[in-house]
């Protein structure tokens, strides 16, 4: 495995610098909020149908507040491989989103916790994210983590599978895994990014779009 896929590489990187990768925060936040709005509407439709059928609370993302009223819960976001990105902080503080930030580098989680009190930063390896129960999020955001974990790395196909297995496990039904990637298929050499992202946990569905 090359250095880029290892926690040692990232521990050392995060000790040296705090970087926002790929895109300005406001651009990423705007993209995330579009998907967040779709998920909110999806959750509302689900809650309405549950109540109409007398289902009430099912332990899912919506709660029956009693007397046929629904108490809305916001879509829950896991910001995976967050590093020192402030995307999750801005989503929570400025857009009232429900965000858990996670990264496998303990050092950067400690420094982010100190810098942004009130925001949640958890050390977790996205290949085996046992800290998070199954179906506990509606959205996983990943900016650069999938890229780095699978970049020119021996065993990257297995790593990609583990990342997708875990994302599919922690997501509730209808949830989305949103990956911001700077990789074209060419850069990846022997792998095809779109092929690599096809996974049964997501019904084989991959939607790709580019941000200018
Ligand atoms: C290219 S950086 C992107 C950081 C941040 N998302 C951003 O956009 O600024 C990749 C990040 O993924 C984290 N990472 C890599 N592999 C990981 C894994 N298996 N589990 C959790 N975090 C991981 C690294 O520690 C690093 O913070």
Image: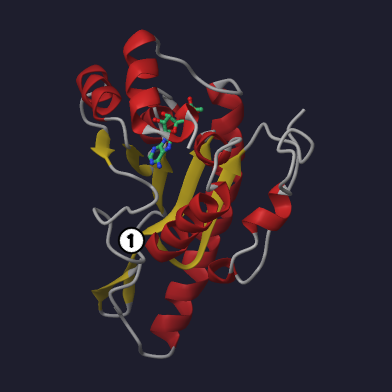
Q: Is residue 7 left or right of residue 167?
A: left
Name the one closer to the observer, 172 or 15: 15
Name the one closer to the observer, 111 or 158: 158
Local secondary structure at mark 1: loop
Residue 205 drawn above or below residue 103: below
Q: Position of residue 23 (x, y in %)?
A: 61, 23
Q: Is residue 101 visible?
A: yes
Name the one closer to the observer, 89 or 1: 1
At a point 34% along the width and 58% down the height, the residue shown is: 73
Q: Is residue 93 left or right of residue 192?
A: left
Ligand 1 location (quadrant): top left
Q: Position of residue 162 (x, y in %)?
A: 46, 56
Residue 119 drawn above or below residue 13: below
Count of numbered tags: 1
Name the one closer to the observer, 179 or 175: 179
Where on the picture, by quarter, is residue 63? bottom left
Q: Which residue is mark 1?
A: 136
Q: Position of residue 21 (x, y in %)?
A: 54, 22
Where on the picture, by quarter, is residue 172? bottom left
At a point 32% along the width and 23% down the height, the residue shown is: 11
At a point 47% along the width and 66% down the height, the residue shown is: 43
Q: Position of residue 116 (x, y in %)?
A: 26, 22
Quadrant of the image containing the C terminus = top right
At a point 49% along the width and 43% down the height, the residue shown is: 141
The local crowd at label 1, few if under 14, some if 14 to 19, many if 20 or more residues have their Cα within 10 Å, is some
Q: Is residue 207 visible?
A: no
């Amino acid at each position: 495995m090359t250095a880029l896929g290892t926690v040692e590489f990232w521990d050392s990187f995060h000790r040296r610098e705090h970087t926002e990768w790929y895109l300005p925060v406001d651009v990423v936040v705007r993209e995330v909020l579009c998907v967040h709005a779709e998920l909110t509407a999806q959750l509302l439709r689900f809650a309405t149908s549950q109540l109409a059928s007398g289902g009430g609370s099912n332990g899912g993302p919506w709660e029956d507040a009693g007397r046929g009223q629904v108490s809305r819960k916001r879509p829950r976001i896991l910001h995976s491989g967050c590093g020192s990105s402030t995307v999750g902080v801005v989503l929570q503080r400025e857009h009232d989103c429900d965000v858990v930030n996670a990264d496998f580098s303990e050092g950067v989680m400690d420094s982010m916790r100190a810098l942004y009190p009130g925001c949640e930063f958890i050390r977790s390896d996205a290949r085996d994210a046992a800290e998070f129960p199954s179906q506990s999020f509606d959205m996983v955001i990943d900016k650069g983590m999938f890229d780095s974990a699978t970049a020119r790395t021996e065993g990257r196909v297995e790593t990609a599978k583990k990342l997708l297995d875990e994302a599919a496990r922690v997501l509730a039904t209808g949830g989305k895994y949103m990956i911001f990637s700077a990789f074209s298929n060419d850069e990846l050499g022997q792998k095809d990014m779109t092929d690599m992202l096809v996974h049964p946990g997501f019904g084989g569905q991959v939607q790709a779009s580019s941000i200018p």
